[in-house]
Amino acid sequence: MVALASAMLLASLGTSIANIALPTLAEAFSAPFGQVQGVVVAYLATLTVSVVIVGRLGDVHGLTRMLLVGLGVFAAASLLCGVAPTLWVLIAARALQGIGAAFLMTLSMALMRETAGEARVGRAMGLLGTVSALGTALGPVLGGVLIPLAGWRAVFLVQVPLAVAALVLTVALLPRGAGKGEPARLRLREVMDRRVAPNLLTNVLVAAVMMTTLVVGPFYLGIGLGLTEAVVGLVMAVGPVISIVSGVPSGRLVDGWGSRRVMAAGLVLLAAGAFLIAILPGLIGVAGYVLAIAVLTPGYQLFQAANNTAALADVPKDRRGTVSGLLGLSRNIGLIVGASVMGAVFALGAGTANVTLADPAAIGAGMRLAFLTAGGLMIAAFLVASGTLFGRVARA
């Protein structure tokens, strides 16, 4: 569990640590912001398109072996990022790093299911949720410390020894035969016949709602409520902190109550939190926003631990990598939907495509519409999940 958690931590750290360096990179390479964004987009794009392929490679060639390959790729790509002479080389190296991260995220989940005892699967998935949130929250903090001290290259070079350490842990601690089975010919329809499809759809919807908080939240807090950037940062940190604290307890609840009940509870909290974000800040300001996030975020961790456990529960060993890849793919699709579609809903409610020019009242209206829509999505997710979790309606 320690070795696999370190791999997940590294992948999530790589996702968030580069964002804070974008202004510095724009200055260092004398490049417009649109080009510099490629440093982030390349990582996310290759990660998204690689997860299912990586999962299949793990099923065929062994999960442990492919995780070691992924750690090697991630370490080499991080080194290349750190010594990149041009912006385009940096972007290409980040694309390679994203492929390595796909190995880390996908195979650590599949191997966690493989190596954890039946009574501890939920706890193991909760641990992955905790370290994922920790890596996401730690990235901007670590980057903010390193850039003034050693420049932007340190943001990438610091990941090299971390990747090497994770590789050593994997070799030393993970059973050599973990995840190694007879390769089977996999068809997507056969995977879906395992009733994984509802888990994937609800994963898309939940991820879209969580991305809505990251896209809409800063605009509402900064423009709608008039908070300073420092205060906005503190408020936005509330969610990741709660995620870190609630991840492992969520997994324990899955082990004790079962994934069905915990997933239902998580979706109810997600729906309630989304509706509260639409209502409470307009009544009591930033305190209402924080209270709503305090309801929404534990719901997300409950859902993640339960959904991942349920999706992998009855999957044969030779398909766990593929299903883990599908879970990662559905999550990333949800993040894209949240950033694009829900961002468009926010702009529609604000009455302008350029929300930076909107007044506080318009921003508030956009925020309400976005999170009322998000609450509706969570009701839809509950209905999708209940058809599978209670009565197995999907079998018909």
Image (cartoon, helix red, strand yellow):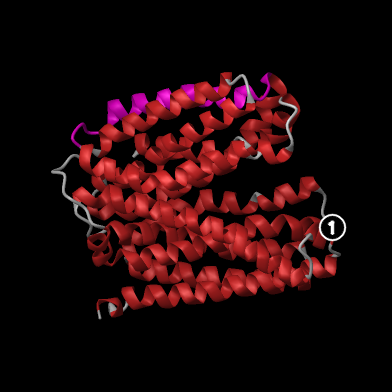
Whether 176 is among the magenta residues is: yes
Asked if residue 154 is positioned above or below residue 52 in the image, the reply reads above
Residue 337 quadrant: bottom right
Work out whether residue 255 can be spotted.
no
Q: Amino acid at mark 1?
A: Gly
**Where residue 94 sits in the image (x, y, percent)?**
53, 32
- Residue at 31% across / 64% down in the picture? 196
Whether 54 is among the magenta residues is: no
User: Which one is in front, 183 or 171?
Assistant: 183
- Residue at 85% across / 59% down in the picture? 357
Residue 173 quadrant: top left
Residue under circle 1? 226
Q: Quarter of the image for the C terminus: give it.
A: bottom left
Q: Which segment did they paint magenta?
A: 150-177
Asked if residue 394 is positioned above or below residue 137 in the image, the reply reads below
Q: Look at the numbered disc 1 and give the secondary structure of its residue.
A: loop
Identity of the residue furthest to the left in this view: 182
Residue 122 quadrant: bottom left
Q: Please name the predominant secondary structure of the magenta segment in the image.
A: helix
**Where residue 191 sits in the image (x, y, percent)?**
25, 60
**Where residue 327 sits in the image (x, y, percent)?**
38, 55
